[in-house]
Structures are given as C-alpha cells and as structure tokens.
Image (cartoon, rainbow, N blue to C red):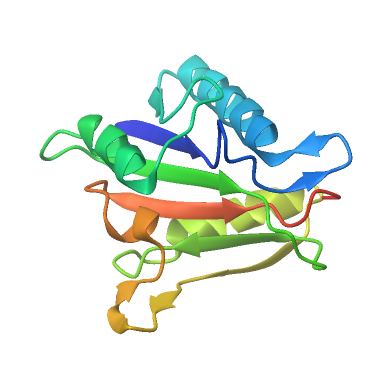
C-alpha cells in the first residue's frame, strides 16, 4: 500500500458505545493515532479522517477520505469501531470487491497476540446485494476498505 487512511469512528457529539469510563470515540481516536505512529515509523504515508474530537457525517468522512486519494493510488482505508454486543472478539468486514488476503492476515496477527477473532467476512446490502452494506466500505475510491470491529468494550 502506498498510503493508509485511518478512520476512527464517531467523534464530537456522537460518542459511540459508552461503558463506565470507556467512551468509544476517544478509544477509536487513540487507537487510530497509535496505528498512524506505527505506520509512519515504517515510512508508510498515513492520514486520519479526524485528529480531534470532531463531529463528522458519513458524507464529510467520505469527502475527507477521497481527498487523500489520487487516481491510481494504492490506498487502504481502515475504520475502527466498537460494537455494543455480548460477543467477545474481533470481526473484520472487507469489501465485496476485495479478496480476503488482508483480512485473513489481520485475523492471524490478532490471534497471534492473543485476541479472539470471531470472523472476517463481507456484508452485502440487502437492498442491492451487488453492493456492500456499509457506505464507508462501498463508496471510497481507495484500493481496499476494511472495518475492524473490536467487539464490546470489555475486549
């Protein structure tokens, strides 16, 4: 990948999952900044959709994401989220246009550090099964788009 775009979910007035002192929007941003730092240390160009606690609509996020991508770029979009669920474990959702190689590699690496991975999969839009369910996987012009759902806050 020439560049990685990291999309920490929520922000601003949209906090995501809250559990005790855990606030998803803050965790997603911390995780995104940590990943950005790691990738930049490996000389991989990285961009964040938000660097502060700011509110962004999906349309604004897509505009920001697409502003980082030039025609012909090999860009990876990674979105982090937490899910308010009873399940403990990571799920990785990848685009219908992609093969599972990256998702499988991420899954293997997370399992190697002791995290439980429930599954990696594609999710179709029930209204148009030829398209992805999530707009943030379906719409960006990046080469590969994934959502890493880190399970519930107790993970």
In this rendering, the answer to whether 47 lies above or below 138 is above
Residue drawn at (54%, 42%), measured in percent from left and top? 9
Residue 21's x, y, as percent?
Answer: 86, 34
Left/right of residue 144 with respect to residue 146 in the rendered view: left
Residue drawn at (30%, 37%), measured in percent from left and top? 65
Give the image quarter of residue 107: bottom right
Give the image quarter of residue 45: top left
Residue 33's x, y, as percent?
Answer: 57, 23
Residue 71's x, y, as percent?
Answer: 10, 38
Judging depth in this view, the residue of 121 and 11 nearest the camera is 11
In this rendering, the answer to whether 151 lies above or below 72 is below
Judging depth in this view, the residue of 129 and 101 nearest the camera is 129
In this rendering, the answer to whether 74 lies above or below 2 is below
Residue 98's x, y, as percent?
Answer: 33, 64
Residue 113 appears in the picture as rendered: no
Residue drawn at (77%, 44%), measured in percent from left and top? 18
Residue 119 appears in the picture as rendered: yes
Residue drawn at (35%, 59%), measured in percent from left and top? 135
Left/right of residue 77 with respect to residue 148 in the rendered view: left
């Amino acid at each position: 990948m020439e560049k990685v775009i990291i999309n920490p979910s929520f922000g601003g007035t949209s906090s995501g999952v809250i559990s005790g002192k855990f606030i998803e929007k803050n965790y997603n941003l911390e995780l995104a900044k940590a990943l950005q730092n790691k990738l930049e240390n490996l000389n991989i160009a990285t961009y964040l959709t938000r660097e502060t606690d700011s509110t962004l609509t999906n349309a604004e996020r897509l505009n920001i994401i697409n502003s980082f991508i030039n025609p012909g770029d090999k860009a990876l979009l990674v979105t982090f989220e937490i899910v308010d669920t009873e399940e403990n474990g990571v799920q990785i959702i990848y685009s219908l246009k992609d093969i599972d190689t990256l998702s499988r590699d991420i899954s293997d690496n997370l399992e190697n550090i002791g995290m439980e991975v429930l599954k990696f999969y594609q999710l179709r839009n029930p209204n148009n099964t030829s398209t992805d369910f999530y707009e943030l996987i379906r719409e960006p012009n990046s080469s590969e788009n994934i959502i890493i759902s880190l399970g519930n806050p107790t993970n």
